[in-house]
């Protein structure tokens, strides 16, 4: 939830001065113009990471990249007149483009992913909706590969980490923990919302979940689900939810608040805010969000912890965790697993050896995708007996 402001300091010493305001207060400096009148930076604007320039005097900002997609990995020539940028979209794998810095006229100069299989992909679009309190929320929606408006499909609600992460318009068939296009090929709709607390929408939006984990963001996520049900895109009885890190936290908390989901997968999720603060490698993280330590805010930490609200959870849950996770220790998953097990809730827990907070080994990434899909097929479509709900 912290901000990153840009300051300019004279090379020969002197007082630092703030250069100007940026959209999200989370800019990363990329270099200076050859004439020293501007500096370049990258920052996410809603669902699109972009490249910008800011004037040294006056702080006026201009966009060096325009249009949709994900712009990153920027590099400038010595005279800073052209720039090379890696560009990708939900349907297009990353490629290098070249453009003048004064006017964005991109030309693709690589074809490094020409050997990708020519497989059909589900269409992806950015959608918006209103939350319970009227706040505008945006998300990235991927349709099944052979989507038909005459059908209602099962939905996977995929929640990002952070909580100050953000889902962007990046290539949806890239290797990731949650295989978006594999789910689309299996006839699932995938909604990836950017609820309050996400980056890309300004500092006020990013800090809107202070003291409110699991409540305002819950309303944001569920309002997106409700929109797709109202539009007839998804079947109300065919809902699944998953997420890693904060997404795992949110998944575990969601199933303590509702029984609407037929299946859930908690990946490296924070499930007990109190024990997390005492065991994680970032002990000051939650006190920043909750304005104090657990011993000063006992009721608050309990209110926002899945473990203190776990009684009665019945959603079949797949828990995935890395053995060597220092950020969200393995004990967070074990606590939740034991709580569900003791209540006879269908639950499985898989621990990946050698694995830190995110899976690194390709075989584990593949295993997670396969297990996730199998879990949803079993409990949403009920392929091991029972009838489909879509």
Image (cartoon, rainbow, N blue to C red):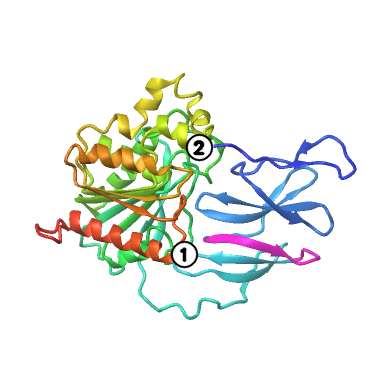
| Count of number-bearing discs | 2
Q: Which residue is found at the position 59% from the left and 77% from the top?
A: 110
Measured as percent of width and height from the top left, residue 39 is found at 75, 52
Name which quarter of the figure residue 213 lies in.
Answer: top left
Position above or below: 362 against 117 = above
Q: Which residue is found at the position 15% from the left and 56% from the top?
A: 389
Q: Nearer the viewer, mark 2 or mark 1?
A: 1
Measured as percent of width and height from the top left, residue 145 is found at 31, 68
Picture quarter with the N terminus = top right
Give the number of the disc on residue 269.
Answer: none
Q: Which residues are magenta?
A: 69-81
Q: Is residue 209 visible?
A: no
Residue 78: in magenta span: yes
Foreground: 339 or 79?
339
Q: What element does badge 2 sit on?
A: helix
Residue sitting at the far left:
386
Residue 183: in magenta span: no
Measured as percent of width and height from the top left, residue 41 is found at 68, 52
Q: Is residue 260 visible?
A: yes
Residue beneath disc 1:
171
N-term-proximal mark, 2 vs 1: 1
Give the number of the disc on residue 205.
Answer: 2
Instruction: Report whether 351 appears left or right of 24.
Output: left
Callouts 2 and 1 close, C-beta under 8 Å: no
Instruction: Report whether 374 appears left or right of 162.
Output: left
Instruction: Report whether 294 appears left or right of 77.
Output: left
Name which quarter of the figure residue 373 lies in.
Answer: bottom left
Picture quarter with the C terminus = bottom left
Name which quarter of the figure residue 222 lies in.
Answer: top left
Q: Which residue is found at the position 37% from the left and 30% from the top?
A: 304
Position above or below: 366 against 44 = below
């Amino acid at each position: 939830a912290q901000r990153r402001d840009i300051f300019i300091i004279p090379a020969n010493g002197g007082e630092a001065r703030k250069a100007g305001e940026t959209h999200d207060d989370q800019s990363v400096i990329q270099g200076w113009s050859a004439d020293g009148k501007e500096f370049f930076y990258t920052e996410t604007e809603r669902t699109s990471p972009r490249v910008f320039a800011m004037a040294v005097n006056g702080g006026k900002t201009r966009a060096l990249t325009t249009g949709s997609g994900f712009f990153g990995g920027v590099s400038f020539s010595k005279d800073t007149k052209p720039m090379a940028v890696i560009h990708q979209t939900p349907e297009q794998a990353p490629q290098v483009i070249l453009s003048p810095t004064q006017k964005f006229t991109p030309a693709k100069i690589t074809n490094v992913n020409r050997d990708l299989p020519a497989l059909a992909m589900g269409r992806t679009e950015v959608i918006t909706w209103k939350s319970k309190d009227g706040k505008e929320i945006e998300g990235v929606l991927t349709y099944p590969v052979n989507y038909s408006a005459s059908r209602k499909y099962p939905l996977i609600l995929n929640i990002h980490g952070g909580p100050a992460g953000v889902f962007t318009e990046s290539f949806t068939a890239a290797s990731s923990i949650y295989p978006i296009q594999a789910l689309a090929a299996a006839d699932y709709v995938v909604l990836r919302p950017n609820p309050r607390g996400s980056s890309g929408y300004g500092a006020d939006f990013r800090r809107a979940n202070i003291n409110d984990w699991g409540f305002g963001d819950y309303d944001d996520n569920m309002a997106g689900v409700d929109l797709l049900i109202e539009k007839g895109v998804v079947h109300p009885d065919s809902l699944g939810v998953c997420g890693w890190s904060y997404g795992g936290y949110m998944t575990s908390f969601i199933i303590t608040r509702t029984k609407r989901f037929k299946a859930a997968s908690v990946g490296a999720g924070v499930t007990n805010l109190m024990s997390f603060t005492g065991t994680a490698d970032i002990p000051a993280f939650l006190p920043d969000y909750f304005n104090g330590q657990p011993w000063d805010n006992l009721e608050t930490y309990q209110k926002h912890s899945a473990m203190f609200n776990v009684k009665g959870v019945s959603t079949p849950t797949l828990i995935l965790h890395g053995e060597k996770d220092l950020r969200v220790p393995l004990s967070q998953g074990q606590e939740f697993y034991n709580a569900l097990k003791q209540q006879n809730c269908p639950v499985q827990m898989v621990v990946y050896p050698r694995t830190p907070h995110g899976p690194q080994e390709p075989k584990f990434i593949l295993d997670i995708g396969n297990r996730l899909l199998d879990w949803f097929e079993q409990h949403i479509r009920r392929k091991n007996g029972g009838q489909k709900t879509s």
